Image (tube, grey):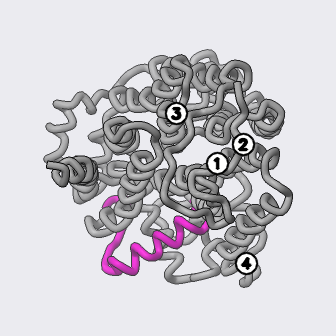
C-alpha cells in the first residue's frame, strides 16, 4: 500500500503530461499559419548562409515565402530552427503550403517547452502534490498556451521555460544556473530581458557586489558566446539592428483582433472609425515604454519587491507600453502569473493573477481558430468540425468587441502593476526545500534573496 501511494502521484503527473502532449501533437501536423512557413525559410537561409544569416534576415531574397517579413529575434530560436531542418532536410514551405514533417519538426521543441514549464511549476509550487498538479494543469491545459505552440507554432514557450527556471533556481540559491537561464531566455525572445532586468535590480539590493557581478558576467558571457558567430563575419549593423530594435516601426494595429496593447488598439480604432490621425500618439509609446521600465525598476528596488512579483510586473509593463503586442507575448505573463497565484498570501492578488493567466484564453472564442487548419496545404479539414463543436470557429465580430477585450486585459495588467507597488508587501510563500546544493555555495533551501517581513 505504501509503495502504491508513492507511485500514485508520479503516475497521475505522467498521465497529465501524456494528455497535454497528445492534445498538442494531435493537432500540430494539421495546422500552419504564415509564421510556420516563414520559419522554414529562416532555417533554410541559415543552412545556406551560416553566420552571415543576419545579412539576409530582412527577407528580401526569393527564398522567403513572404517577402520583407524578416527574422527579428536573437539567435537561439534560429539555432533550434536549424536543428529542426537537419532532422527533416526534405521538408519544404511556400506561401501556399507547408510540409507535414516541417510542421512537426518546428513545433516539437515548443511543445516540449510547454511540458517543461508544466513540470517546473509542479516542482516549484509550494504545498501538497494535488496543489502542485492543479497549477501545472492550469498551464498545460490553458487554451492560449495550446494555441500558441500547437496551432500557431510560436516559440514564446521556450523563452518562458528558460525564464521560469531562472527564477526558480535563483530563489533556490543556484545563482550561476539562474543567470545562465536568464540569458538564454533573453537570447530567445528579447522582451524577456525586461523581467530579467527587474530580477537583477531586485537581487542587487541583497547580493554582495561579488555575487552580483559574477551573475552579470555569466549573463554577458552567454549572450556574447551566442552572438559572436554572427559578428565575426562583420555583420554588426544587421545583427544589432535585428536584436536590439523593434521588428516593426510604430503603425496602426491592423487587423484589430490581433492588437493587445490597449493604447495602440484604441488609437487604431479611433483612426479607423473617426478617421483621426493618431499615428503620432502611437509613436509616443516608445519613450513611454523606456520611462515605464525605468520607473518600474526604481520601484522594484526601493519597495523591496519580491523577485517573482517584480518579474511579472516587468512583463506587464511591456504589455502595457509596447505598441505592438501580439497574442503570443502573453504566454510569458501567463506562466509568471500562475506561479505568483500559487505563492501569494493575498486573496486579491491570487484572484487577479489567475485572471491574468486565464483571461487570454477567452480570445480564442472570439476568433476562428479553424483558419489555421485550412490556411495552407495540406489542410486539416477533418479538425474543423471538432473545433466547431468547441466553439472555436467564431468570426465576423466587429472591431469594438476585440477592442473591449484588449481594454479589459489592459486594465487588469495596469491594476496588478499598481497594486504590486502599493499594496502587496508581504513576501510570497517560500519554495519547498529541495535536496540540492547551490552552485554558488548556498545551502539547499536557503533563499537566494532575503525575504522582507510585512
Label 1's element? loop
Look at the picture and state if 277 lies above or below 19.
Answer: above
- The answer to the question of whether label 2 and label 1 lie on touching residues, with beta carbons closer than 8 A, is yes
- The answer to the question of whether label 4 and label 2 lie on touching residues, with beta carbons closer than 8 A, is no
In magenta, the rendered stretch is 70-97
- The answer to the question of whether label 4 and label 1 lie on touching residues, with beta carbons closer than 8 A, is no
Which circle's residue, 1 or 3, is located before the other in the chain? 3
Which residue, given by chain and number where applicable, does mark 2 sit on?
450
- The answer to the question of whether label 1 and label 3 lie on touching residues, with beta carbons closer than 8 A, is no
Label 3's element? loop
- The answer to the question of whether label 4 and label 3 lie on touching residues, with beta carbons closer than 8 A, is no
Q: Residue at x 16, y 51 (%)?
A: 4
- For the residue pair 177 and 145, the one nearer the viewer reads as 177
Q: How far apart are the two marked residues, 4 and 1, measured between alpha carbons? A: 38 Å
Which residue, given by chain and number where applicable, does mark 1 sit on?
447
Which residue, given by chain and number where applicable, does mark 3 sit on?
343
Q: Quadrant of the C terminus?
A: top right
Residue 239 in percent (x, y) is at 71, 68
Amino acid at each position: 500500500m505504501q509503495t502504491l501511494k508513492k507511485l500514485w502521484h508520479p503516475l497521475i503527473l505522467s498521465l497529465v503530461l501524456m494528455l497535454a502532449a497528445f492534445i498538442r501533437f494531435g493537432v500540430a501536423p494539421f495546422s500552419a499559419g504564415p509564421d510556420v512557413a516563414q520559419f522554414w525559410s529562416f532555417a533554410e537561409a541559415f543552412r545556406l548562409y551560416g553566420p552571415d544569416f543576419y545579412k539576409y534576415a530582412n527577407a528580401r531574397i526569393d527564398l522567403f515565402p513572404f517577402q520583407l517579413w524578416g527574422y527579428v529575434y536573437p539567435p537561439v530560436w534560429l539555432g533550434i530552427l536549424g536543428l529542426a531542418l537537419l532532422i527533416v532536410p526534405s521538408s519544404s514551405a511556400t506561401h501556399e503550403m507547408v510540409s507535414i514533417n516541417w510542421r512537426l519538426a518546428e513545433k516539437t521543441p515548443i511543445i516540449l517547452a510547454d511540458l517543461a514549464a508544466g513540470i517546473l511549476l509542479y516542482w516549484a509550487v509550494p504545498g501538497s502534490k494535488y496543489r502542485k498538479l492543479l497549477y501545472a494543469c492550469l498551464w498545460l491545459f490553458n487554451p492560449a498556451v495550446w494555441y500558441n505552440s500547437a496551432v500557431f507554432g510560436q516559440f514564446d514557450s521556450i523563452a518562458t521555460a528558460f525564464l521560469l527556471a531562472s527564477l526558480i533556481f535563483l530563489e533556490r540559491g543556484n545563482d550561476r544556473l539562474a543567470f545562465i537561464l536568464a540569458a538564454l531566455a533573453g537570447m530567445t525572445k528579447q522582451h524577456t530581458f525586461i523581467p530579467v532586468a527587474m530580477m537583477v535590480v531586485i537581487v542587487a539590493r541583497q547580493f554582495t557586489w561579488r555575487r552580483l557581478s559574477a551573475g552579470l558576467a555569466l549573463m554577458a558571457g552567454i549572450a556574447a558566446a551566442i552572438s559572436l558567430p554572427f559578428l565575426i563575419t562583420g555583420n554588426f549593423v544587421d545583427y544589432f539592428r535585428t536584436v536590439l530594435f523593434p521588428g516593426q516601426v510604430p503603425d496602426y494595429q491592423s487587423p484589430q483582433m490581433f492588437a493587445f496593447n490597449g493604447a495602440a488598439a484604441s488609437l487604431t480604432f479611433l483612426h479607423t472609425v473617426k478617421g483621426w490621425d493618431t499615428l503620432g500618439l502611437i509613436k509616443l509609446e516608445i519613450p513611454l515604454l523606456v520611462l515605464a521600465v525605468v520607473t518600474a525598476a526604481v520601484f522594484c528596488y526601493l519597495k523591496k519587491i519580491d523577485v517573482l512579483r517584480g518579474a511579472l510586473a516587468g512583463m506587464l509593463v511591456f504589455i502595457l507600453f509596447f505598441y505592438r503586442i501580439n497574442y503570443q507575448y502573453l504566454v510569458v505573463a501567463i506562466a509568471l502569473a500562475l506561479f505568483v497565484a500559487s505563492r501569494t498570501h493575498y486573496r486579491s492578488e491570487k484572484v487577479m493573477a489567475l485572471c491574468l493567466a486565464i483571461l487570454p484564453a477567452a480570445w480564442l472564442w472570439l476568433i476562428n481558430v479553424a483558419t489555421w487548419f485550412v490556411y495552407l496545404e495540406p489542410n486539416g479539414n477533418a479538425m474543423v468540425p471538432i473545433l466547431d463543436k468547441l466553439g472555436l470557429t467564431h468570426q465576423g465580430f466587429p472591431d469594438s468587441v476585440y477592442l473591449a477585450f484588449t481594454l479589459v486585459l489592459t486594465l487588469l495588467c495596469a491594476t496588478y502593476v499598481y497594486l504590486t507597488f502599493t499594496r502587496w508587501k508581504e513576501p510570497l510563500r517560500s519554495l519547498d526545500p529541495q535536496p540540492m546544493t547551490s552552485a554558488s555555495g548556498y545551502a539547499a533551501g536557503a533563499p537566494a534573496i532575503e525575504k522582507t517581513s510585512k
